[in-house]
Amino acid sequence: MCTACACGTQDSASTQAAAVGADASVYTVSGMTCGHCVSSVSSEIGKVGGVTGVQVDLASGSVSVSGAGFSDEDIRAAVERAGYTPTGAAPVGAF
């Protein structure tokens, strides 16, 4: 059972809401333990203006976000609205 949200699911798979390009930033998010957690984080980040792609890797706790016109603070706030803790961001190259 998921200890973060008590949804009763266990899922170690990654999910991809949209294509994540070479201009992505990767955020570390703590507290995600299941598919519901991944869905919640993806959904909130996807609502941020300018975000064109979100990819969550549950196993590593990493969230890759691509697009333009948003700030790290926008993404951190979205992660917090989903009920999780963002711990860092770094630009990355192509996936």
Image (tube, grey):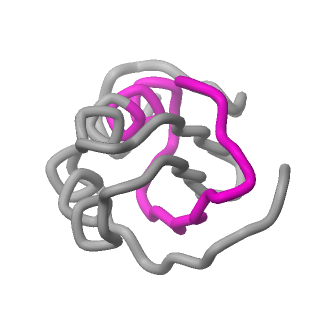
Towards the viewer: 14 or 3: 14
Q: Position of residue 48 (x, y in %)?
A: 25, 43
Residue at 39 percent of width and 42 percent of height: 51
Tell me the magenta residue range: 17-42
Q: Horizontal placement of 8 versus 77: left or right?
A: right
Classify residue 1 as left or right of residue 15: left
Q: Is residue 58 above or below residue 60?
A: above
> Which of the two residues, 64 or 15, is positioned nearer the viewer here?
64
Q: Nearer the viewer, residue 83 or 78?
A: 78
- Can you say whether 6 is above or below 75 in the image? above
Q: Please provide percent x and percent y for residue 45.
A: 33, 42
22 is within the stretch colored magenta: yes
Q: Is residue 68 above or below residue 88?
A: above
Q: Position of residue 75 (x, y in %)?
A: 31, 59
Vertical relation: 34 (above or below) 58: above
Q: Quadrant of residue 11?
A: top right
Question: Residue at coordinates 57% horizontally, 64% vertically from top-left?
Answer: 25
- Percent position of residue 17, x then y: 53, 24
Magenta span includes 53:
no
